Image (spheres, grey):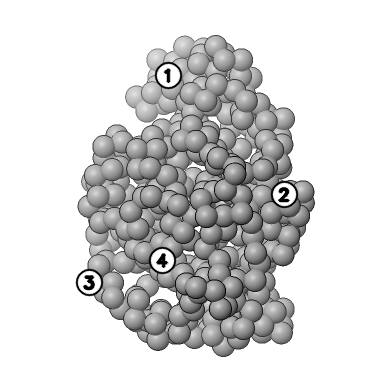
């Protein structure tokens, strides 16, 4: 690479120096060609993705951090949110899941709309901007129930953004409504739906689907549902459950199919790699991913998903120090304050079920990043950086 021109700005000079550094590190580890592609803004191929999974982790991390800082600089995003898992009754019987219960099984529950409203009202003293509502597939809940819990959330806190219903849940909701999802989505939006989470994708490969969650919608069906969500004007996240029986090639296939849909719809906001937690599941004999595996998954996601703005290190799934390290391995978001997450704690997650906003800010600062409190759609609510918007003066984020 050539020397920095004398006319370059300090920012462009720093970017050029960073590019030279990552290419130099990549050269040492045999992936210089991949680094040159990333620096040039060229898309990595599936074959490139497979090489990233097998290359030196720290070289891959350096490259992912370059891509992350090109998009977001030192910013690290979080929000003040709460989770409402409205039922754990589920008929999908996924082998990796510890959350699901059968209707008469000990611990089975479903919340009434009034209980959902009470959960949200209980947090009115906290500056929550988002409620994240996902749950099992309870076959006896009717269509009106889903409309009612959305209305309950908005009744409890009219200003709240309701991020609800995975693609799997939306498939069930449309079946209960007995009409196409294209007709259902506007009714859900009218009841209060603001955006959709990214869960339920697992791994798109048919082999993994058949072996681990064959009663759930297929990868093709998940993508088709997400397409309809985006066409309806809703944003969503996307995920991959990693660290169980999937191969590297199946992971790369999953990432490639996500970015192809994103090319088409531009509807995905954030990619979240979800670590498999084996405890209390039918797959408890599988050890699950290590902290280094989690960092690699985030880094590869950042490099392969060149058209998805944000990569989230979901702190609830990993130790806080791993989430902090992830901010140097491609991640630019750590999720939020959460409040009473159930799904991953049933599978053995040992992280807290909620944290104070001040703790999230401290974690991000300690990781050497600039905390940016956002809302669900990445409007700035508060920032440590005086050049950003401050509380009460939201402004859009780039990317």
- Tag 2–tag 4 contact (CB < 8 Å): no
Q: Nearer the viewer, mark 1 or mark 2?
A: 2
Which residue, given by chain and number where applicable, does mark 2 sit on?
208
Above or below, 347 against 163 in this view is above
Nearer the observer, disc 3 or disc 1? 3
Badge 4: residue crowd in 10 Å (few <14, some 14–19, many ≥20): many
- From the image, tell me which residue sits under label 3: 125
Residue at position x 28%, y 72% in the image: 123
Q: CA distance from mark 1 to mark 2?
A: 43 Å
Q: In front of the other: label 4 or label 3?
A: 4
Callout 3: few (<14), some (14-19), or many (20+) C-alpha neighbours within 10 Å? few
- Which image quadrant: the N terminus? top right
Q: Which mark is residue 17?
A: 1
Write down the quadrant of residue 255 in the picture: top right
Q: Earlier in the sequence, mark 4 or mark 3?
A: 4
Location of residue 339 by image quarter: bottom left
Measured in 3D between alpha carbons, the distance from the residue under mark 3 to the one under mark 1, in whole angstroms, is 47 Å
Nearest-to-viewer mark from 2 and 3: 2
Q: Which mark is residue 150?
A: none
């Amino acid at each position: 690479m050539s020397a920095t021109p004398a006319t370059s700005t300090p920012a462009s000079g720093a970017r050029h120096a960073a590019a030279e550094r990552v290419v130099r590190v990549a050269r040492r580890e045999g992936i210089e060609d991949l680094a040159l592609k990333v620096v040039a803004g060229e898309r990595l191929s599936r074959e490139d993705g497979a090489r990233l999974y097998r290359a030196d982790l720290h070289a891959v991390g350096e490259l992912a951090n370059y891509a992350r800082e090109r998009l977001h600089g030192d910013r690290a995003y979080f929000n003040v949110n709460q989770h409402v898992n409205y039922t754990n009754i589920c008929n999908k019987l996924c082998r990796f899941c510890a959350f699901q219960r059968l209707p008469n099984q000990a611990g089975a529950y479903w919340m009434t709309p009034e209980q959902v409203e009470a959960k949200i009202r209980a947090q009115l003293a906290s500056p929550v901007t988002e409620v994240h509502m996902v749950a099992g597939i309870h076959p006896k809940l009717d269509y009106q129930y889903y409309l009612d819990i959305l209305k309950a959330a908005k009744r409890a806190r009219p200003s709240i953004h309701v991020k609800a219903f995975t693609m799997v849940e939306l498939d069930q909701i449309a079946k209960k409504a007995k009409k196409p999802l294209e007709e259902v989505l506007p009714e859900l939006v009218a009841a209060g739906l603001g955006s959709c989470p990214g869960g339920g994708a697992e791994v798109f490969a048919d082999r993994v689907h058949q072996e681990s969650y064959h009663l759930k919608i297929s990868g093709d069906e998940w993508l088709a549902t997400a397409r309809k969500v985006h066409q309806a004007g809703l944003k969503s996240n996307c995920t991959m459950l990693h660290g169980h029986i999937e191969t590297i090639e199946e992971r790369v296939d999953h990432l490639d199919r996500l970015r192809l849909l994103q090319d088409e719809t531009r509807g995905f906001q954030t990619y979240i790699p979800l670590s498999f937690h084996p405890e209390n599941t039918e797959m408890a004999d599988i050890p699950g991913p290590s902290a280094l595996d989690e960092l690699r998954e985030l880094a590869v996601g950042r490099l392969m998903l060149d058209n998805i703005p944000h990569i989230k290190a979901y702190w609830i799934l990993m130790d806080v120090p791993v989430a902090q390290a992830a901010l140097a391995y491609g991640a630019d978001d750590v999720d939020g304050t959460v409040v009473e997450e159930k799904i991953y704690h049933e599978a053995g997650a040992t992280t807290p079920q909620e944290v104070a906003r001040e703790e999230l800010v401290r974690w991000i600062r300690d990781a050497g990043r600039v905390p940016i409190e956002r809302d669900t759609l990445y409007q700035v609510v508060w920032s440590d950086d005086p050049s950003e918007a401050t509380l009460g003066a939201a402004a859009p984020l780039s990317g």
